[in-house]
Amino acid sequence: MPIPSETPVLDTLMAMTADSIERCGMAPDMLILTRIAALAAMDAPAVSYLAHVEPAMREHMTARQLQDVLVAIAPIVGTARVMSAATHITEALGVAIAVAEADVENGM
């Protein structure tokens, strides 16, 4: 029987992501870049990119690497999707920075 949770959807998504990462033989940075490309192709919302900000930072990924992914997929997914992805990535980074600043202010 599953353990009750206040965030069952988020918990399920986190478990699916962890399982996928565990079973994947890709290097962590390549895995993140592949996921970013898939999110862009799907026109995913900013919150979907937010889940990849911390892992990308842990892997010391650069903005240039993220830009390169968007440049690489532009001929496939199109201008609108790439511009949407760039906007959503920027929004996700803004949220991540705001959360980190709040944690610092609260002594966490």
Image (spheres, grey):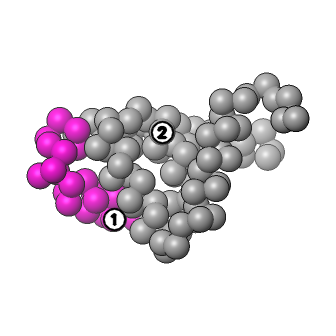
Task: Count the marks.
Answer: 2
Name the residue at 64% across, 55% down.
18
Name the residue at 78% across, 39% down.
106
Q: In the picture shown, does residue 103 fall above or below 56?
A: above
In the picture of the structure, the residue carrying the numbered disc 2 is 48
In the picture of the structure, the residue carrying the numbered disc 1 is 65
| Residue 56, image x, y percentages | 50, 60
Q: Amino acid at mark 2?
A: Ser
Q: In the picture shown, does residue 70 fall above or below 77?
A: below
Of residues 8 and 69, the one nearer the viewer is 8
> Which structural element holds mark 1?
helix
Q: Residues within 10 Å of mark 1 (few under 14, many from 20)?
A: few
**Span highlighted in magenta in the image:** 62-82
Is residue 38 shown left or right of residue 31? left
Q: Is residue 102 visible?
A: no
Q: Amino acid at mark 1?
A: Gln
- Quick one: label 2 or label 1, which is nearer the N terminus? 2
| Residue 54, image x, y percentages | 57, 54
Is residue 57 shown left or right of residue 30? right
Majority SS type along the magenta span: helix
